[in-house]
Amino acid sequence: MQETKICPYPGLRPFTEEESIFFKGRDLHIQQIIAQLEEKKFVMLTGASGDGKSSVVYAGVIPNVRAGFFKAKFNKWVFVDFRPERSPLKNMAGALAKHHGLEQEKVEKRLTSGFSSLLEVYKSSKYYLDMESEQYISADEKAKKELKRKAANLFILVDQFEEFYTNIENFSQGKPTLDAQLVVNIFLETAKIALEKKLPVYIIFTMRSDFIGQCAAFRGLPEYIGYSQFFVPRLKRREIYQVIEDPAKMSGNNISRRLLEI
């Protein structure tokens, strides 16, 4: 039986969660992002093109969250991720519907009902547990454990947020469309309420840093970026060695030290 060769380097595309074992050199940054997300419920993750913003979340933050390296109310998680592309509202509704077992059209319609609509979708799902409700308070310890076992925190990733600006369907003549502004408003309101009410909902945007100036077009967004932004730094030499050398070793290969020094 021929042994299957594994390539630990994905090339220009981002690392996936399944490839997290090969994602190296960002341990400190992952810890910093998680700490910021725990505290503020929202992080705008920015960096230069090709600096690995998506990889940091998919192959770094999310696997660490799954592994329990995140202080949250429940042990289980629901991960919802999407890219805005040309239809941010539709894509957002599709991602929520998929992970909550709902019909996309109904979710999309519900999202247009108000800025707190995303939280309403979560609260009406099987994953939400109101620990101040009469049902929970009056339950015995065994029942409380079962209720908590079924509940889940909600993690939302809006990857490549710059697509709000690069597609004319979302942004035209320096102004966002109504749907684009609605989606951004929903997320900002969700983050605000989650922080105030201590709800287990967490949001990450990834965006190329050269679009920071255009964020002023969305009401309320610059204030949130100022409140909770994380700029993905360039890797230091030691971290670059880890990125190159460690995946090779894990796949049964070796990298010449002379090559590393180039």
Image: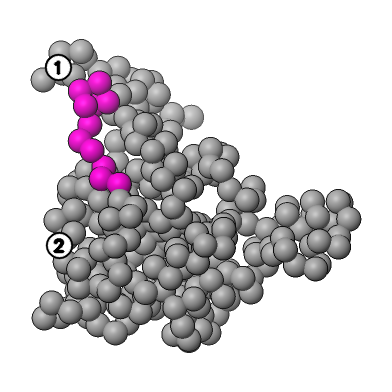
Above or below, 199 relative to 25:
below
Which residues make up the magenta segment? 230-241
Residue 19 visible, this angle: no
Residue closer to the observer: 232 or 42: 42
Residue 62 visible, this angle: yes
SS state under label 1: loop
Q: Which mark is residue 213?
A: 2
Left or right: residue 186 versus residue 225 is right
Mark 2 or 1: in front is 2
Provide residue 170's location: percent of width, then percent of height. Answer: 24, 77
Q: Which of disc 1 and disc 2 is earlier in sequence?
A: 2
* In magenta stretch: residue 235: yes
Q: Amino acid at mark 1?
A: Glu
Q: Residue at x 25, y 63 (%)?
A: 222
The residue wearing badge 1 is 261
Quadrant the C terminus occupies:
top left
The quadrant holding residue 30 is top left
Q: Residue at x 39, y 43 (%)?
A: 33
Q: CA distance from mark 2 to mark 1?
A: 37 Å
Above or below, 126 relative to 10:
below
The quadrant holding residue 208 is bottom left
Q: Which colour assignment does the render follow?
A: one colour
SS state under label 2: helix
Badge 1: residue crowd in 10 Å (few <14, some 14–19, many ≥20): few
Badge 2: residue crowd in 10 Å (few <14, some 14–19, many ≥20): few
* In magenta stretch: residue 136: no
Q: Amino acid at mark 2?
A: Gly
Left or right: residue 155 versus residue 228 is right
Left or right: residue 156 versus residue 101 is left
Q: Residue at x 38, y 31 (%)?
A: 27
Left or right: residue 47 versus residue 66 is left
Q: Do callouts 2 and 1 mark residues in contact (Cβ within 8 Å)? A: no
